[in-house]
Amino acid sequence: MPKGRRQRGRSYVGEGVAGDTGSIWEWLVIAQVKEGTEDRGAIESVIRTVRKTLLTADPPTLLPLNNKRRFIGGWAMIDAGHFAVHILSKEAREKYFPDQRNW
């Protein structure tokens, strides 16, 4: 890697869930922020980026008002109607979603 460049985190596109999930959402998006960045505003930054992207899409996705609530325990969620976006720290993902393949 060239000097002065930081290494970015890994990207994992995830896996689909076959059949009826029995959930209120058709899709769940789970995003994990890079380890060690949770306390430096990484989760809030991802929330802002996702909300901005969804609101400026054509057609825009209707979202609840942004009430400036803080994330709890390294976990934040955006309810976008037919799908939900979960933004988590590594610790929260391991605690609440220990084995995603069992879905």
Image: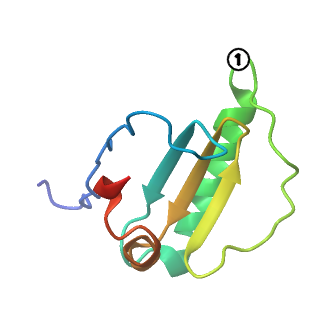
Q: Nearer the viewer, residue 72 or 28?
A: 28
Q: Is residue 23 left or right of residue 78?
A: left
Helix, strand or loop for disc 1: loop
Q: Residue at x 72, y 28 (%)?
A: 56
- Locate residue 1 relative to residue 14 in the image: left or right: left
Amino acid type, residue under disc 1 in the picture: Asp
Image spot of residue 75 (x, y percent): 57, 71
Q: Position of residue 67 (x, y in %)?
A: 87, 62
* Front one among 1 and 13: 13
* Residue sitting farthest toward the left: 1
Which image quarter is the N terminus in? bottom left
Against 92, is 18 above or below? above
Q: Residue at x 47, y 73 (%)?
A: 96
Q: Which residue is mark 1?
A: 58
Q: How many callouts does the rendering have? A: 1
**Residue 81 x, y percent position in the rendering:** 73, 38
Residue that protrudes farthest toward the top in the picture: 58
**Colour mode of the rendering:** rainbow
Q: Residues within 10 Å of mark 1 (few under 14, many from 20)?
A: few
Q: Residue at x 50, y 76 (%)?
A: 38
**Which of the 4 image quadrants contains residue 7?**
bottom left
Q: Position of residue 3 (x, y in %)?
A: 16, 60
Q: Is residue 67 depicted above or below 52 in this figure? A: below
Name which residue lies at 67% across and 45% down: 24
Q: Relative to 92, is 90 on the left or the right?
A: left
